Image: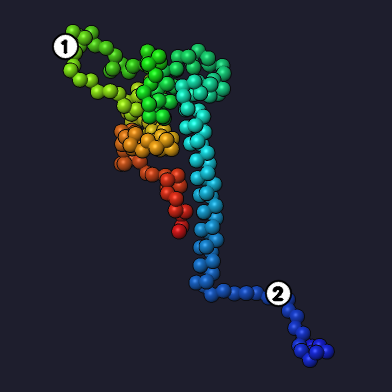
């Protein structure tokens, strides 16, 4: 230290260290972690929103769009794509909560258990037959893909399709899919995709 011409002291120091109290340091550390978690959560949410928009508004907009998308990914399997037209029609109908177009219904594969029974054909017709729901079409799609009961892929697909349906304001249909194919006992909601409260807050 030395006085300057104004009569004040001029002080210089090196290696200054600032030490916070323990609870202040913990608070700053937690705030830093929350900011990082929030940034990651926002990126994941934007990615999932973008993916849902891409599937719902482009890929699964209608059967034609789904076929074009499928061919773009499997250009060497044209015959398989033609064979899967019924499955694609069911998937797009389920995603949009609509019935399969009449012109495509003959292409829908029937599971073995749902194929006509010649003996039953002799029975008198039922007075009332329930119209198939979007969940019924989705069930037929899963069966046609070979995803039998107990296959974890059934629940995964149901969750993805339900998220797309919710963007179309079809919450009841989305809930029906989740109840039927991904019940609460095995379904843990994705907080990052459905909860607008960032983790840690």
Which tag is nearer the camera, tag 2 or tag 1? 1
Residue drawn where x is 30% and y is 23% of the image: 132
Q: Nearer the viewer, residue 61 or 190?
A: 61
| SS for dot 1 | loop
Which color mode does the image show?
rainbow
Q: Which residue is mark 1?
A: 124
Q: Who comes first in sequence, dot 2 or dot 1?
A: 2
Q: CA distance from mark 2 to mark 1?
A: 96 Å
Q: Could you tell whether 142 is left or right of 47 in the image?
A: left
Callout 2–callout 1 Cβ contact below 8 Å: no
- Assign the N terminus to one quadrant of the image: bottom right
Q: Which residue is mark 2?
A: 15
Residue drawn where x is 68% and y is 75% of the image: 16
| SS for dot 2 | loop
Residue drawn where x is 34% and y is 27% of the image: 134
Question: Residue 53 at x, y = what percent?
Answer: 50, 36
| Crowd tier of the residue under label 1, counting other residues whose Cα lies within 10 Å: few below 14, some 14–19, many 20 or above | few
């Amino acid at each position: 230290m030395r006085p300057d011409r104004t009569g004040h002291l001029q002080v210089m120091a090196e290696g200054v260290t600032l030490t916070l109290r323990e609870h202040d340091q913990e608070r700053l550390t937690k705030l830093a972690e929350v900011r990082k978690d929030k940034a990651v959560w926002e990126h994941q949410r934007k990615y999932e929103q973008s993916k849902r928009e891409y599937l719902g508004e482009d890929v699964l907009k209608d059967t034609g769009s789904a076929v074009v998308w499928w061919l773009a990914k499997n250009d060497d399997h044209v015959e398989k794509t033609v064979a899967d037209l019924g499955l694609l029609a069911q998937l797009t109908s389920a995603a949009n909560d609509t019935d399969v177009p009449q012109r495509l219904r003959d292409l829908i594969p029937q599971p073995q258990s749902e194929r006509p029974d010649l003996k039953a054909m002799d029975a008198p017709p039922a007075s009332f037959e329930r119209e198939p729901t979007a969940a019924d079409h989705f069930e037929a799609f899963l069966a046609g893909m070979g995803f039998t009961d107990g296959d974890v892929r059934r629940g995964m697909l149901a969750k993805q399709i339900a998220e797309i349906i919710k963007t179309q304001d079809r919450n009841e249909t989305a809930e029906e899919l989740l109840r039927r194919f991904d019940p609460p006992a095995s379904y843990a909601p994705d907080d990052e995709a459905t909860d607008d409260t960032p983790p840690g807050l």
